[in-house]
Image: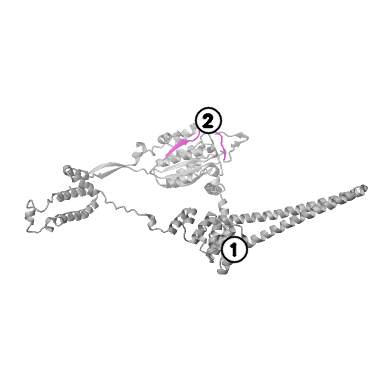
Amino acid sequence: MADFHFLRPWMFLAIVPLAWIVWRMLYQHVHGGSWENICDKALLPFMMLSGKSRSSKFPIWLFVWASVVLVLALAGPSWKQMPSSVFNNTQPLIIVLDVSRSMNAIDLQPSRIARARYKIRDLLKRRKEGQTGLVVFAGVAFVITPLTQDVGTLLHQMQNMSPDIMQYQGSNVASGLRQALLLLKNTNIKSGEILLVADGLGTANGLAEAKRIKKAGFKLFVLGVGTVAGGLIRDKNGKFFTHNGGVVRPRLIVEPLQALAEAGGGKFSMMTVDNVDIDSLLPVVNMSDGLATKQKIKAQIWLDEGPLLLFLLLPLALFAFRRGWILIVVILVMPLQDPAIAASWNSYVNVDQEAYRQFKKGNFKKAAALFKNENWKAVSFYRLGQFKEAIQIWERKDSVFANYNRGNALASLKQCKNALDAYERVLQLKPEHKQAQHNRTEMILCLEKEARKKGKGQQGQQGQGQQGQGQQGQGQQGQGQQGQGQQGQGQQGQGQQGQGQQGQGQQGQGQQGQGQQGQGQQGQGKQAAKTGKDGKKNPGKGHNGKSGKGGKPNRGMSVKQMTEAEQAYKQWLRQVPENPGGLWKAKFRRQYRLQYYNNRFKNSRNHSRPSQPW
């Protein structure tokens, strides 16, 4: 018993509350509920049926016994060990994804690249341990994520991988395998796997790189994407890819991929709809015995003997057959419920508070009927669009608050003159009111537009009258000159030509006047629309007479007004499309230029240029 110890010794802290419970039970047994506290000691022997006035302490000691046994069992006594096998999957996995143009083929719906991303996502969801990295390749290879435990980041970045982000096309498998091998060697791990997800080898088949992978102690698995029949390549514009005047139809050739997997010491599998390919291709995912034995660790685990002590509590179950014992346990376990007290909310809320609650809910009609406060009642009418009712209330008050909002309501009704008077009254009471100053300017412009409309209308009527008189005079002149020969006809023709020019000028002038009139009406319509929209948007905040944010006729004006430059800048930002793949495309372009134009990479084996552009 030299090895005897407790696996969870902190459970002995439960003795402290248990000791307090036992003390309370003994105290209640001695002092609480006894007849000595009620009857006289001289009469007590005659009142009791037996000589003993106290009840038995047996239930208390029974509780103490059960508590001690339970605490010991929870502490986990242990005195012997047993061997156990612990598996720890530390195998790194590098996924090499083909993002060449041929991965846009539609023989697999919706495309090969989409199906490959789905398959990798399913694989990573089942891979709960180990580090994972991602390498993509087309004409050249790039590292997307190094070996990491963060699978979520890898999946997020993989969604942006597509052939559109690769500047240099091709199917350079050797470059992708070379990058994956370099990542594994940098981790100083003796074993690991590389999963190649591709639809072909192209001209650079990568057999030499596969042999290097096997020689370094790693394994290469290959997942073929596509069908033997092949499919057309569709770009992002929906057009099919052509080369040398013909439509390209890449087919999946299985034999080179199988040879590549055998050279790398792994297996080859075609992509399937279910997870059969994953189960057969990567045993490390489902923790089969083939690779898991490499990570098996022998460990000695202490055996918990605490459950054996529970057998000592079984005799206590016999007391459960005693009448009333189980009921006591149920009463002790059940929590006491708080008494339910029902009261009406109206007992604590007055009419205005209830109206404000309806106002916040958007029920302005009911709020207007309930409000006793005239200002809030007018605001409710304003929100309903009943501007006349709101004006009637605010006309009875002469304050900044009332006059400003009365002006907003009048502006919504297009009564520019009365609204101007209301804003001028606000400026008399509070000259620094910025919103009133702005709205006063808007009303002056509104009155000027109305005056211009009236002036254009009168000019149009006068022009039409003069045009009718001219036509009548010219008709009489033509009748007088009708019998005078060719000269008279020439003069008549000139007169008619002059008449036509005059008519055209008057017609053009009329059209210009109508255009100005239409512009004025359009400007007023927009201004009224802004007034109505902003008045209904948030008038409650502007009725304090300070910020004027509520019933303003101009939507763009506020206390925290943005400048035109800020608005234009934000509008420009909203027009920028969200394209995370564009960042990767720019990064790949920069890395490719550094490699291609550097003499150390240009003539070395690290940069092979396949001739197949898909």
Which badge, 1 or 2, is on the more N-terminal residue?
A: 2
Tell me the residue that label 2 is attached to.
229
Residue 26: quarter of image: bottom left
Q: Position of residue 76 (x, y in %)?
A: 23, 47
Which of 159/367 is in front? 367
- Residue drawn at x 28%, y 44% is 299
Residue 153 in sight: yes
Visual colour scheme? one colour
Left of 153 or right of it: where is 530? right
Question: Mark 1 and mark 2: span between their CA atoms?
Answer: 72 Å
Single out the mark in the foreground, 1 or 2.
1
Q: Position of residue 272 (x, y in %)?
A: 45, 33
Q: Which quadrant of the rendered structure holds the C terminus?
A: top right
Which amino acid type corresponds to the residue marked 1 in the rendered image?
His
Height in image: 585 above or below 273? below
Residue 438: quarter of image: bottom right
Which amino acid type corresponds to the residue marked 2 in the rendered image?
Ala
Tell me the residue that label 1 is attached to.
438
